[in-house]
Image (spheres, helix red, strand yellow):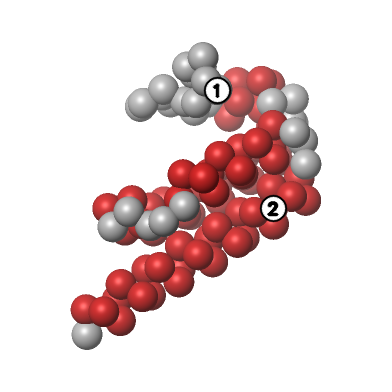
């Protein structure tokens, strides 16, 4: 599924069944997590294009919390991450005025 460093290879199609199996989660929580990531994709273009600080570090922290099966930590990290994405996008919009 990924490289020797535990990262997903570029353009790797994530199959929820396989990911759930590898991370020892049932499919329902994994499906919900993937939906949240899809929702986040609405702002991904902006935060990636404009290189939001600490973006990749946050993704790694979220992934590690999931891998550790720490759902509470993963959820808190994801909420913080989405809030930072939103604030970054709003900051960019305000700069354009």
Q: Position of residue 17 (x, y in %)?
A: 62, 24
Using residue 93 as the reference point, say whether residue 74 is left or right of it.
right
Q: Is residue 42 visible?
A: no
Using residue 43 as the reference point, say whether residue 25 is left or right of it.
right
Q: Position of residue 58 (x, y in %)?
A: 54, 48
At label 2, counting other C-alpha atoms closer than 10 Å, the crowd grade (few under 14, some 14-19, many 20 or more) is some
Q: Earlier in the sequence, mark 2 or mark 1?
A: 1
Please say if 9 is above or below 71: above
Q: Nearer the viewer, mark 2 or mark 1?
A: 1
**Count of marks overlaid on the render:** 2
Using residue 93 as the reference point, say whether residue 63 is left or right of it.
right
Q: Nearer the viewer, residue 71 or 92?
A: 92
Q: Nearer the viewer, residue 59 or 25?
A: 59
Q: Position of residue 18 (x, y in %)?
A: 60, 21
**Residue at horizontal 46 percent and vertical 44 percent from the top:** 56
**Residue at horizontal 69 percent and vertical 26 percent from the top:** 23
**Residue at horizontal 74 percent and vertical 25 percent from the top:** 24
Q: Quadrant of the C terminus?
A: bottom left
Please say if 47 is above or below 6: below
Image quadrant in which you'd find residue 83? bottom right
Q: CA distance from mark 2 to mark 1?
A: 21 Å
Q: Which residue is mark 1?
A: 6
Q: Which residue is mark 2?
A: 75
Badge 2 vs badge 1, beta-carbon distance below 8 Å: no
Q: Position of residue 8 (x, y in %)?
A: 47, 25
Q: Give the SS element for disc 1.
A: loop
Q: Give the SS element for disc 2.
A: helix
Please say if 37 is above or below 12: below
**Residue at horizontal 45 percent and vertical 62 percent from the top:** 85
């Amino acid at each position: 599924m990924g490289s020797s460093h535990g990262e997903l290879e570029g353009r790797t199609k994530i199959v929820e069944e396989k990911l759930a199996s590898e991370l020892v989660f049932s499919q329902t929580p994994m499906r919900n997590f993937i939906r949240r990531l899809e929702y986040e994709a609405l702002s991904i273009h902006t935060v990636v294009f404009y290189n939001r600080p600490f973006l990749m570090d946050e993704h790694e922290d979220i992934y590690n919390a999931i891998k550790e099966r720490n759902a509470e930590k993963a959820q808190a990290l994801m909420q913080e991450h989405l809030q930072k994405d939103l604030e970054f996008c709003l900051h960019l919009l305000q700069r354009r005025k």
